[in-house]
Amino acid sequence: MEVRVKSITWEAPGIHTYELVPLRPEPLPPFTAGAHIDVILPGGVARQYSLHNPPRERHRYLVSVLHLPAGRGGSDALHRNTKAGDILAISEPRNHFELIEGAARYVLVAGGIGVTPLIAMVARLAELQADHVLHYCCRSRDSAAFSAALEPLVADGRVVFHEDGGVPGNGLNVMRLFSECAQGTQVYCCGPAGLMSAVRTATSHWPAGTVHFESFSAPALSAPPPGVAGEVEFEVELASTGRVIPVPHHQTMLEALRAHGVDLDSSCEAGTCGTCMTRYCEGEPDHQDYILGAEEQQEFLMVCVSRSKSRRIKLDL
Ligand code: FES
């Protein structure tokens, strides 16, 4: 759908917030805390940005974008070429980082611009009067997005800033934070790979389904193309017909399927949006996405980035 950029505001150094409003008087499609939209950039490339306004709002979407001049081009296109009044094409909201409501307590951990989906969660949890705390890891409060808006929540313990001055070891001690697995607590984490990996390790003894992650960026351009893993070749079997399609080392599963006429939806093609999620019936996937939790990995894979550890993998297609 198309939306108008109503305003662009400075949020923090290098971070702009885009207010997107409908072209017609009808309200925008609803969303839930943790949801994102695809923004379609010139050339048809889609980039995913989390919505961070309160989920009850239907008159606008708010997304905040960190300018990464050496990134994959999405933030550059928005920061340099987009102005108030422009029309942008976006997808409807999708949510692979859904807030499970009704838990006894919530611990949210954010790093840098990864705070955006958690801002919507803070709003929703406050509405629900749920017990929650946001640990916000940043270089300094001055450089952190939304720090002014979050400041009033510091006094009552709803927000804790962890300023590390650029040295991650000086910030939040996640091993200590998650050493005890508190009954009924749900954990949500979004931030740089290092932070998410530390939280993953620190919560490895927590029950399945209680710790949730969302990556806010795909691998850097210098990384190998997602879904293309060196020499490994394998076959995909389509469960509906028994047809077998080879996946050579230089193609992703998605590319190989498309090359053989199997049409599949995709968006980011980097394992960060969930559009291409597909059920598998047999085989051992090599998951390389940034979305699926351990339990979901037993059933699904992302065909844009996943490969196969077994010679053949059977997809529910
Ligand atoms: S297309 Fe986004 S995860 Fe595959």
Image (spheres, rainbow, N blue to C red):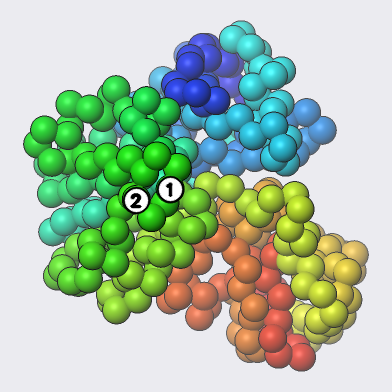
As rendered, which of 9 and 165 lies closer to the eye? 165
Q: Residue furthest left?
A: 156
SS class, disc 1? loop
Q: Residue at x 21, y 39 (%)?
A: 159
Q: Which residue is mark 2?
A: 170
Residue 249 location, x and y as percent? 86, 75
The Cα–Cα distance between marks 1 and 2, rounded to whole angstroms, is 6 Å
Q: Amino acid at mark 1?
A: Val
Q: What's the amino acid at mark 2? A: Asn
Residue at image location 85% in from the left, 79% down from the top: 231
In the displayed structure image, the side of residue 73 where residue 24 appears, left or right: left
Q: Are marks 1 and 2 in contact (CB under 8 Å)?
A: yes
The numbered mark at residue 48 is: none
Image quarter hosting the C terminus: bottom right
* Count of labels in the image: 2
Q: Does residue 16 appear to the left or right of 202 in the view shown?
A: right
Judge the density around disc 2: few (<14), some (14-19), many (≥20) Cα neighbours within 10 Å.
few
Q: Residue at x 45, y 42 (%)?
A: 166
Q: Against 135, is 313 above or below?
A: below
Question: Which quadrant would residue 250 be assigned to in this image?
Answer: bottom right
Residue 156 or residue 266, whichever sits in front = 156
Report if residue 262 is visible in the image: no
Up-down: is 139 above or below 26?
below
Name the secondary structure under disc 2: helix
Q: Position of residue 125 (x, y in %)?
A: 21, 42
Q: Can residue 90 be seen in the rendering of this structure? A: yes
In the rendered image, which residue does mark 1 sit on? 167
